[in-house]
Image (tube, rainbow, N blue to C red):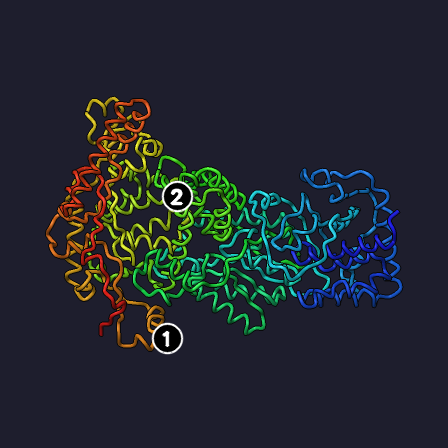
Amino acid sequence: MTPPSAACEDSKVLVRTTLREVLAGREDPEGVFAVCVSALGHQETRSQFLSLIHPLSTANSSLHSTLTSIYKEYFSRTVDDELECAMALSLLEMKDHQLSTPSQESRRQQPGNRPNQMISVSQQQGSSHTQLADVVARRKTNNSPQAGPWVKDGPPQTTPKPELQKSTHADKYVKETPGTSQTVCVSRLTDEADLNLSEKPKRSKNRRQRRKGAGQQVVGLPCSPSALPPVLLWFRRDLRLWDNPALICSLEVGASVIPVFIWSPEEEEGPGITVAMGGACKYWLHQALSCFSSSLERIGSHLVFFEANRSSLHTLKELVKETGARTVLANALYEPWLKERDDEVVSALQKDGVECRVFHSYCLRDPYSVSTEGVGLRGIGSVSHFMNCCKQNPGSALGAPLDPPVSLPTTAHWPQGVSLGTLGLARMPRRKDGTTIDWAANIRESWDFSEEGACARLETFLNDGVYRYEKESGRADAPNTSCLSPYLHFGQLSPRWLLWDAKGAHCRPPKFQRKLAWRDLAYWQLTLFPDLPWESLRPPYKALRWSSDRGHLKAWQRGKTGYPLVDAAMRQLWLTGWMNNYMRHVVASFLIAYLYLPWQEGYRWFQDTLVDADVAIDAMMWQNGGMCGLDHWNFVMHPVDAAMTCDPNGSYVRKWCPELADLPDELIHKPWKCPASMLRRTGVVFGQTYPERIVTDLEERRNHSLQDVALVRKEFGQYVDKRSGCDLVPLPPRLVSEALGLSNRDGGVVTEGKQFLLPVITRMEFKHQLEDPDADAASNPYNAVLKGYVSRKRDETIAFLNERDFTASVLYEGVQRMERLESDHRRIEGLPRPPAPRGRARQTPTAKDRFSVLPGGAVSSVR
């Protein structure tokens, strides 16, 4: 037999372990007290409980106060109440000896758990005994206990707190559902580590181990007997359980949690022509909400949907009044109009005595906290400048991702919401005959909208595609990209989690991790320039003579331009709601440089059709592509030659333009050069099976576009720096204040009567064209047309022959040696470089000319 002193120590270890479970949000305070009474007995609990929970008085005063109140209330009960509790204890002890075989629930535990860590559940038909947890939860006022079982299926999860990692899997207690008689035997724990509240959080480096319990099912938590007001957990674009700060904080309150989602189209879609929430985004949101609601149901809660009749603030006030909630928690959004909305909500609720907290998690760095102090403004708009600003002015530590809770405390009184379908997010148009046009059928087949789908896609990418990402992410014919952007946008995957897992992988490509910096940069620019989605940042480019040909725009949108690479990309966008970054550059260059259509048209179409449509990222990239953003694209994608980089064998075009599938690899990207006999043989008829080219003179249209830019820059000479040739951009008040060393609140005073101009990155092609506006693009030494790897197929053939043919290998090495010798000779003699051969890729010269030098003064002003 176990000595009494050893049994007592085991019981104390069990109580301490349960306290850890409370801190992790997997247990409620009543469960701690129930365990203590069950393990120590009535008298020992009376004498030792307060000393056992004493460490919480400094680590978590609110939890300590709650446990103390439960203790005092329990021991102030009448004799009848104590007798009832004693009977319940004796029943539990009797059943503990009777149970000999694990139940079906225990057998469902995952392999690898030790037998003494399993939970045994026995069901006996017709029994009416109640458990100890019900006895403890019953109030003197005879309030009925919350109906609903509380059972964990599968092994418990790892938590980010070290004191929880030290202990073995903690036992769970099952709250009996009325009408059944589930009883629980609590197994002994093998680890007797003391409760340590001073250690810093740690996290397992094994990504797979952290996710093992993601699909566990926990049903129903009882409402808190302390009768604290419930917490309103306001979900927006943070539809995940993993690494969700607001969700974890809701557990620390110690009250029941009511998850809500409020749909307010006027607020979400943004001002004017922002189109922040297009059709494809709404459809994804509908599916994501459905999946997330199921995830909440697995941990004993559910998501309540509301349609804001006036505003989100008005709906929240009604919910506070209906539920009696005194706390509202949410994760922050950084679009200026949503930030303004959230600030108004926080201010109004706090005036009403409701605590309202907003947590940072949507970006790696809070864009409103980024400062240029110590870095300056030179090079602003580039990701390198932004990363230097973050390094020079570091914010709070990023920290480790948070593990998900395995249960949520429920409330006895749920507010009355609406169904998800009532929000109309996935409403499809109808034809005149009443049938529905299901335009999202292919999107539905192409994506898994759940948080688990995000995990699976990330895991697949880190196990395979990440190794080719650095050099092959531009390929359209191979899945070398992560396709994680929609999950990041809707918060089904946090950027911190993504960065953490990317660094944990064996291969750590800087290019992939840099994408998260680009995302943060986009939100920083949007906070500086709230009109980024519709107003050109560079004043001269507002006067460009854009085309108004709606036929060209419609052909581009529908993938009927006659250029196979462009058509394939636009059809993929329409059918799946996505295309990779390289293809977005291709179609944007074609729209702007060759069709003369304004960048705003492309931005609006992307916002309506992309499932990852993000206002900040789309606006920044379309502004840069439209020549009026802070960072000019220093390239223009040729619609034919760029295909040799991203689709050298034509498989991408064959997939999305099947009418061209029988054309040979050499001609599939330029079918107009096919002989008539080949077209007849393959069944290609221009204007019928495949469209004619909407423009044919690409070089002439490119020259015209370049000349238009030179004319407007000459007309608005006050916005061109005479020394460097760079464009000048008016500075927003926030940057002016930082540049002059003043606080943000003084920004309005600083800029009163003045316009501060900043030289920004400008394409060298434009600088040179300004001297000779009538020159053609071919004569410009900084021609930005990116031809792509025109000789890629030849190079691949040579590489193959080098492995098989010694003679070919020797000749190839000889040619390379001669080229190196000639280059060295020219450099030694000071001779100019040989002209680049026509039809091959050319690098931009790196010579230090006056166009590549920014002036020493970063800021100038014009009255």
Q: Is 139 located above or below residue 221 in the figure?
A: below
**Which of the two residues, 135 or 56, is positioned nearer the viewer here?**
56
Q: Quadrant of the C terminus?
A: bottom left
Alpha carbon distance from label 2 to label 1 = 43 Å
Of residues 449 and 358, the one nearer the viewer is 358
Seen from the viewer's position, the closer of residues 686 and 717 is 717
Total numbered badges shown on the rendered structure = 2
Residue 436 screen position, x and y as percent: 43, 41
Please tell me which residue is depicted at 34% across the width and 63% down the height of the picture: 529
Q: Position of residue 553 (x, y in %)?
A: 26, 46
Residue 689 seen in the figure? no
Question: On the image, numbered disc 2 is attached to which residue?
Answer: 578
Above or below, 741 against 107 in this view is below
Q: In what element is the residue under mark 2?
A: loop
Determine if residue 116 is in view.
Answer: yes
What percent of the width, then of the height, locates residue 592? 24, 49
Q: Residue furthest front?
A: 828
